[in-house]
Amino acid sequence: MLRANNIICSISLVILVTLFFHADLNAQTNSCVDCHKELGDEFQELVESFEGDIHQQFGLSCADCHGGNPSEEDIDLAKDESFKGIPERSKIPEFCASCHSDSSYMRRFNPSLRVDQEDMYWTSEHGQLLKKGDTKVAVCTDCHNTHRIQAATHPKSWTFPWNIPQMCGRCHSDQNYMKDYRISTTQWDDYKESVHAHALFEKKDLSAPVCNDCHGNHGAIPPEVTSIAYICHQCHPSAGDLFSLSPHKTVFDELEISECEACHGNHKILPPTDEMLGTGEKAVCIQCHEPDTSPYQIAFRIKEKLDGFIEKIDIAGNLLEQADREGVDVSEPKFRLTEANTALIFARNLIHSFSLVEIEEKVNEGEKVADEVIQAGEAALREAKFRKTGLIIATAFIFLLAMALYLKIRQIDKKTSV
Ligand code: HEC
Ligand code: HEC
Ligand code: HEC
Ligand code: HEC
Ligand code: HEC
Ligand code: HEC
Ligand code: HEC
Ligand code: HEC
Ligand code: HEC
């Protein structure tokens, strides 16, 4: 009985060991990986890096890109006539596109993936210059990596939003690399100071634009005058719509002034302030409008109107705060004040209509509310004062009463002790 058990055990063991080695052999049939792993640090690094590559995850390997026969262990047999080797830099777009532009091939893996990257690429400034033989421009592997390509949704991917500025900046911020070109190298530094970078990096708001949102992923061209506004519109529809209906729209188009950029800039878009408006030193309006012209007057009046409104909101806020401190319940007028603040937000947005009439209308609406709140605040303070005097009178009265009582008691005491 014991012997039979032993035999069964041994047979199972043999089967298991055979299965294990068989599986291991299967996993090792990729001669490209096997041999390259042994070729020294640099090659080993390459193979290890490829373990996190999306192509590896989809079952593709070295030979799918480089050609050759991965089931041959001998180097000459492995590198048969199908072996492509490494592409020249100028041929990399075609190299990658041999799959990525082939819709029937790509559909087998992911039917929803776009297959126009190469076509788009040739329309970009990068592609245009590469065609002319300039190999310093970005090709697929500069933006995606070579042996650790990852989906754009992977947070470590070079093309994940918060890695993109650094990726583009690797060339565009390098003065030495860009010295042959006439463009500036400040885009990344400027971008870092912008409201957009602040939203992306500080608030982790992935809806804030990075380089590729304004320049395109593959058709990376500087946006033209008309398309800039279109790009900004997509995310700022209300400012965009107002601008399109404003008197500036047609003149800006005629004079080829870029719509939003003229006042906000492109890379270093700072948080807008009221000082941008009007005729003060920091006002954008005076860049184009001379004193004694109608737009200048309008700019002045809009600012004046807005300032008056803000002052009222401040007064109302201060009154409520004071009343609050005095212990009067002002939750209702406080709530009303948020309404006035909302009107202020709308009025600031309405700047893009550049219409005094429209802004006045909105401000008047808000001022009515602010006036009511001011009245409520004053009433609350009166009440607080009234309560205070009431308290003093009451305290005095009680004091007098106590005194009278005391005197009376003493009088009674005197009488009884006699
Ligand atoms: C997605 C396609 C792709 C896959 C898969 C791929 N490579 Fe490459 N490989 C390239 C490209 C493109 C280059 C040229 C790099 C360049 O110029 O930026 C390259 C370059 C190389 C080089 C030259 C040295 C270097 O680092 O540039 C070696 C060696 C190499 N690959 C080996 C491999 C091995 C081994 C594998 C499998 C583990 C592999 N490759 C998988 C696309 C690929
Ligand atoms: C038996 C070892 C061995 C095998 C198998 C092997 N390679 Fe290589 N491979 C090398 C060596 C050694 C070099 C370096 C040659 C040199 O620097 O001239 C190299 C270089 C390369 C290069 C870069 C330079 C070039 O010659 O174009 C690529 C790409 C490459 N191999 C891909 C592959 C692929 C794909 C396979 C599998 C089909 C493979 N290798 C199989 C040993 C091997
Ligand atoms: C200038 C940098 C840059 C170059 C050059 C570039 N890409 Fe991209 N690529 C990106 C960015 C950025 C994304 C996407 C990011 C996103 O979806 O938010 C992307 C996305 C992709 C995607 C995912 C699907 C898609 O279209 O969104 C594929 C596939 C791709 N690129 C392949 C390529 C190929 C192939 C080439 C060369 C012909 C190439 N890329 C050249 C920056 C680049
Ligand atoms: C042998 C065919 C083939 C070649 C050559 C090839 N790819 Fe791919 N690639 C694929 C497949 C298949 C996928 C997986 C599809 C997916 O991501 O859903 C993929 C995925 C990608 C993705 C991720 C897309 C996503 O989901 O966001 C990028 C980026 C990419 N490849 C870039 C490149 C670049 C750059 C090159 C050239 C160096 C290249 N590919 C060469 C077949 C290929
Ligand atoms: C490998 C280096 C490299 C990388 C990476 C790179 N670029 Fe470029 N880019 C260049 C070079 C070189 C030029 C040509 C400069 C010129 O046209 O004056 C250029 C041109 C451009 C232009 C046209 C500028 C003009 O007005 O002429 C834009 C826009 C641009 N790149 C945006 C990007 C964006 C966005 C990214 C990242 C998604 C990026 N680039 C990544 C090297 C690079
Ligand atoms: C909010 C949109 C936006 C973002 C984000 C953005 N750009 Fe731009 N970029 C523009 C506009 C608009 C222009 C000006 C185009 C013109 O005037 O023709 C421009 C111009 C450029 C140019 C041409 C040279 C120059 O400076 O005028 C380059 C290169 C460039 N951007 C690269 C980048 C890089 C790299 C990033 C990321 C760090 C980036 N851009 C982020 C909108 C943007
Ligand atoms: C991909 C979407 C997107 C694009 C494109 C975009 N923005 Fe923004 N923008 C945002 C987000 C998100 C914020 C941050 C909102 C916040 O956190 O308050 C923002 C903030 C701003 C602010 C500050 C608003 C405030 O109240 O403080 C201004 C001004 C601005 N963007 C102007 C522009 C201009 C001009 C362009 C075109 C050159 C542009 N944006 C393109 C998404 C975008
Ligand atoms: C003629 C100058 C000018 C132009 C052109 C302009 N803006 Fe403004 N923008 C301003 C001023 C001034 C403010 C500040 C208002 C305030 O805070 O008092 C402002 C504020 C903003 C704000 C924050 C307030 C709000 O509206 O929510 C955004 C967002 C904005 N602009 C986006 C845009 C976009 C998008 C475009 C292009 C369609 C554009 N701007 C064109 C002058 C301009
Ligand atoms: C980039 C130049 C530029 C900037 C900045 C600019 N404008 Fe204008 N604006 C013009 C031009 C050009 C016209 C049409 C010619 C004219 O009436 O002077 C115009 C027209 C107007 C008009 C219409 C005048 C009418 O009689 O119909 C108003 C109102 C106006 N601007 C207000 C403003 C205000 C307010 C600002 C600041 C927030 C501003 N503009 C900033 C260029 C500019």
Image (tube, rainbow, N blue to C red):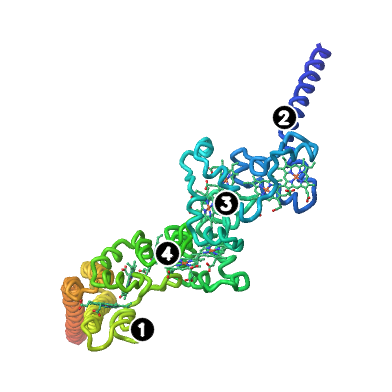
Is there a contact, CB below 8 Å, between mark 4 and mark 2? no
Kindly identify the amino acid type of the residue bearing the numbered disc 1.
Lys
Give how far apart the Cα atoms at labels 4 and 1 are.
Answer: 27 Å
- Alpha-carbon neighbours of circle 1 within 10 Å: few (<14), some, or many (≥20)? some
The response on whether ligand 1 sits within 8 Å of label 2 is: no
In percent of width and height, residue 104 lies at 50, 36
Is there a contact, CB below 8 Å, between mark 2 and mark 3? no
Residue at 79% x, 39% y is 76
| Secondary element at image label 1 | loop
In the rendered image, which residue does mark 4 sit on? 223
- Which mark lies nearer to you, 1 or 3? 3
Kindly identify the amino acid type of the residue bearing the numbered disc 3.
Pro
| Secondary element at image label 3 | helix
In the rendered image, which residue does mark 2 sit on? 23
- Alpha-carbon neighbours of circle 4 within 10 Å: few (<14), some, or many (≥20)? some
Q: Which mark is residue 282?
A: 1
Q: State the count of labels.
A: 4
- Which mark lies nearer to you, 4 or 2? 4
In the rendered image, which residue does mark 3 sit on? 93
